[in-house]
Amino acid sequence: MKILVCISNVPDTTTKVKFVDDFKRLDTTGIQWIINPWDELSLTRALELKDNPSNGIQCVTIAHVGLITTEPTIRKGLAIGADDAIRINTEPSDANFVAAQLAEVIKANPYDIILCGIESSDYNGSNVGGMLAEYLEYPSVSAVSELRIENGQVIINREIDGGKEVVTIPVPFVAIVQKGIAREPRIASMRGIMTARTKPIKVSEPITLDLFTEVVNFEMPKPHPTCKFIDPENPKLLVELLQNEAKVI
Amino acid sequence: MSVLVFTENWDGKFKKLSFEIVSYASKLAEKLGTFSIALSIGNVEKTELERLGKYGAGKVINVSDNLLNILDNQVYSSVIAQIVKKEDAKVIILACNNTGKAIAPRLSVKLKAGAASCVSKLPDSIDPFIVFKKVHSGNAFANIRINTDIKILTLAQNSFELIESENHATIENLPFQIDATLLKTQVKEVQKLTGKILLTDADIVVSGGRGMKSPDNWAPLIELADLLGAATACTRPVSDEGWRPHEEHTGQTGKIIAPNLYFAIGISGSTQHIAGVSSSKCIVAINIDKDAPVFEVARYGIVGDAMKVLPRLVEAVKEIKNK
Ligand SMILES: Cc1cc2nc3c(=O)[nH]c(=O)nc-3n(C[C@H](O)[C@H](O)[C@H](O)COP(=O)(O)OP(=O)(O)OC[C@H]3O[C@@H](n4cnc5c(N)ncnc54)[C@H](O)[C@@H]3O)c2cc1C
């Protein structure tokens, strides 16, 4: 079986975001780019599956939609242990655009298990995985917190609203993964970093497509009201304020 | 033309979230000069379906079939897509929860409809159609234009007030032919979280961080939660250490919640934690360090040792509750 891990290139999660061009564009100066945290966990899980020969995973490939400037992020994924990568050479304009690009390359070269993160930490869209599955006409499972292979059968834990389910799904499929899929993201070893330099990144050119959605502009959150401090000896006052001022209890 | 809202049920019952999205869909329909249709999938009693009318649904469509007892993303999205076409729906609303997030993107591709997820208010502009949503995990917002004829929105939880009225909806039971070959998901086991207030549903959440020092110190925090009818939550290191169950992990990589009241106790207020709770209406922080970043987002704060403050707070709540 072959696993494809779709990764998104996002600002480090502690970035203090700022915008330029009249709030139309993210100010990228000084930003550290990372693999989207959920995608990093997916990749970790894919590699864990591959580590156990009885799972029969031949290769773990990274797919990414982005310009050449994002190659350091792809190299990070290769250093962590992916075998190879595909980069579709275009700006990832919106979720539908990204999913359609990915679907194009996957149709030409199919995979059995496709992993996408539940959202990207920049646009918080939660859309690419499901859209990709629909373009491919593959089944999809969302909110996946565990994925294992037993006797050639994929077994998945998914979170539903109000509980958990253990489900099975035939390959090929798309799993949209969240917390739990792997405990800690795998870290690149020195050797991994060295070998990543020579691992292949295949570059594909994009298809043209109308955009379904576009960002008009960004806004910053309203400043928080300054915190009212309450004497630790007098929590009764807090309860009164919650009752009468904030009216939340 | 109509606005279609997909209302999920839990063992045949709707939740506040269902009524929020129906209220939202109905208000949006009013803006568009049309009406809203609530779609319910599964076994729901007529009296329960009628409740959707009270929140403005003009019509309720009920589809039930044994094949729909399993949430299969392909089956559900194909059913909804067919109803969208039948009812000429131009806007489709789902909840921004696990189910909504599973179905909306598939629908989007099926219907060539632009999708925006977790929008948090009514669109300011209908033509062009511009929606407002959180990005960068709450550190910014974006206005997003949807260019397509049909639009799909998922609505963030607790972001829209319920609007009740005297409205009555007609109920239409729709016989439906489901393509059984689409059903690929097989459920082997279900673990329901019962008897607990679900974190994502709770109006009040009491949450503890590493400043709680040890898993043995949670009793007063749980007592406070019980007194307030609140759910309990925690930060990532707390669940990673196994002090609290993983379901309680809140933040960017855990649950994203938006209660009316959030208590952050012994929580420093890292960007990743706040990302999961920044939509809370009111945050109370209790922390020994007066410079903890959590106070920047809190409306009320107590600087002090949680182990001393919590028991006092519990007593104060008891006193007020007994009045
Ligand atoms: C990619 C990524 C994703 C992440 N996702 C999440 C996430 O989803 N959720 C999450 O929570 N974290 C997440 N984190 C971790 C995050 O960066 C912080 O490490 C974490 O939130 C800190 O948890 P904490 O507040 O419990 O602990 P700490 O930061 O250690 O804070 C403990 C606080 O307790 C206070 N304190 C100590 N003693 C007492 C006392 N006796 N009484 C009162 N207060 C006391 C201290 O002053 C301090 O402010 C993520 C990190 C990364 C890199």
Image (cartoon, coloured by chain):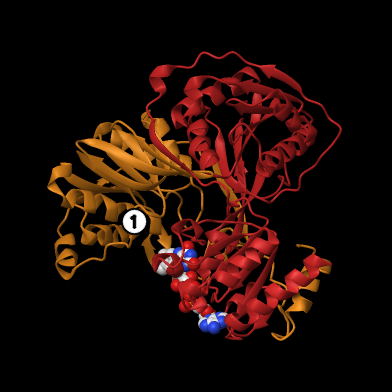
Viewer-proximal residue, B26 or A84? Answer: B26
Q: Position of residue B78 (x, y in %)?
A: 50, 24
Q: Is residue A54 above or below residue A239?
A: above
Q: Is residue B12 visible?
A: yes
Q: Is residue B199 left or right of residue B298?
A: left
Q: Position of residue A216 (x, y in %)?
A: 61, 51
Residue A152 lies in quadrant: top left
Q: Which residue is mark 1?
A: A41
Q: Colour of chain B?
A: red
Viewer-proximal residue, B183 or B316? Answer: B316
Residue A234 lies in quadrant: bottom right
Q: Is residue A29 visible?
A: no
Q: Position of residue B74 (x, y in %)?
A: 44, 28
Q: Is residue B161 left or right of residue A210?
A: right
Q: Residue placed at 51% from the left, 78% from the top?
A: B211
Q: Residue placed at 28% from the left, 56% from the top?
A: A44
Q: Residue placed at 71% from the left, 75% from the top?
A: B315
Q: Is residue A39 above or below residue B43?
A: below
